[in-house]
Amino acid sequence: MPDTPTTTSETLPLRIAADTTPTSLWNDSADPRQLARSIEFGAVGATCNPVIALAAIKSDLETWSPRITQLAKEHPAAGESELGWMVVEELSVQAARLLEPAFRASGGRDGRLSIQTDPRLHRDEAALVEQAVRFSGLAENIIVKIPATAVGIRAIEEATFHGVSINATVSFTVPQALAVAEAIERGLDRRRAAGLPEREFGSVVTIMGGRLDDWLKAWVKEHGVLIDPGHLEWAGVAALKRAHALFEERGYRSRILSAAFRNHMQWSELLGGDLVISPPFEWQERINANGIAVENRIDRPVDSHIVETLLERVPEFGRAYEPDGMTVEEFAGFGATRRTLRQFLEADAALDSLVRDILVPAP
């Protein structure tokens, strides 16, 4: 049998990219065990949301079950949801500690732990801002996720003004990314006008490229549109490349972040850009194991035939790809937004159920 190749930091594509390009690697989980390994690959950030938190807690019930029981004793009047979010906060703070060295080394640009606002607050601007400000105080290197909807855009501007470092979530499109970046700019400008301290906020603007691909695949199926299925694998990449180019052109004080992986191109095709790529840990292992070549591809355009075909055959792609493809008021109704928000809400409910099963086990 052939010898198994030896892998070292010098042969890992993620490590090579982290060391040789301006592209930052973040881990798409706050699970401390996964994050510690991802940091070895070059990760300088991480994220948490209801789906991620639920998976991390369920994978380590030996730790979290007794902790939830202890929290219930310490807070006898707390309900299931409140206790579940206490665990989310603890998980996030633990992960934030692991990232402090990168935070210090980068002057606050990296070394960030993203924690998501409660998706049940998605219709309440004031509640989003209030929770964002509180989350921001959990650790110096916390960055807070707020949904890229009309309500969320207003909350992002206000939270930025109050000194919160921002990450957008429930965000899939170029127009959403631009609206978030503009809101962050307005918030920062208001801080300057008010004489408030200026610093490196490290704000990022997520485009969940894989979830855009998912939605377009569902849309063409529902509408009976036949198209080369390979084209649909490029949709999220095309949106991410276009958004990054526009951010560079307009000089925004935030960076694009690629999330929701469905193929390795959502990493490999973005290398070389001053942006963040946040694969799940499993995808990091796959990229390393397959030896994906590290090349500067961010300025390499997606095949014009693919883009033109998508624009002609899939109107939903045009809404996602063109800077003026949607108005801010249309963001909440976009199919990927509705699908993802529902998943986050369902994960919230599942976390409630998990806490209930621990505190009130079935007879």
Image: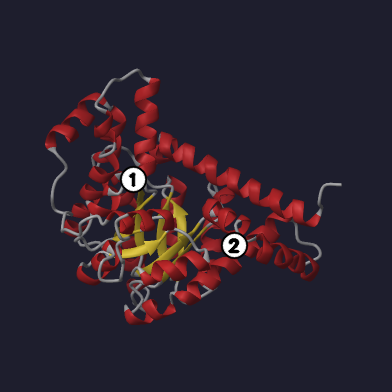
Residue at 46% x, 58% y is 145
Total marks in image: 2
**Label 2: element kind:** helix
Q: Based on the displayed image, in which of its 4 quarters is residue 39 positioned?
A: bottom left
Residue lying furthest right = 363
Q: Earlier in the sequence, mark 1 or mark 2?
A: 2
Along the viewing direction, whichever of 267 and 186 lies nearer the viewer: 267
Residue at 32% x, 45% y is 263
> Which of the numbered marks, if any, corresponds to residue 209?
1
Along the viewing direction, whichever of 333 and 229 lies nearer the viewer: 229
Give the amino acid at mark 2. Answer: Val
Q: Based on the displayed image, in which of its 4 quarters is residue 320 positioned?
A: top left
Circle 2 sits on which residue? 88
What is the C-alpha distance between the residues marked 1 and 2?
Answer: 25 Å
Contact between marks 1 and 2 (CB within 8 A): the answer is no
Asked if residue 303 lies left or right of residue 90, the reply is left
Q: Which quarter of the figure is the N terminus placed in?
A: bottom left
Residue at 39% x, 73% y is 111
* Residue 74 in sight: yes
The percent coordinates of residue 189 (x first, y second) are: 31, 67
The percent coordinates of residue 20 (x first, y second) are: 20, 70
Give the amino acid at mark 1. Answer: Gly
The percent coordinates of residue 70 (x first, y second) are: 76, 69
Asked if residue 24 lies left or right of residue 38, the reply is left
The crowding category of the residue bearing disc 1, from other C-alpha atoms within 10 Å (few below 14, some 14 to 19, many at least 20), is many
The percent coordinates of residue 74 (x first, y second) are: 78, 71
Residue 42 sits above or below residue 327 on the image: below
> Which of the numbered marks, if any, corresponds to residue 85?
none
Q: How is the image coloured?
A: secondary structure
Residue at 71% x, 62% y is 65
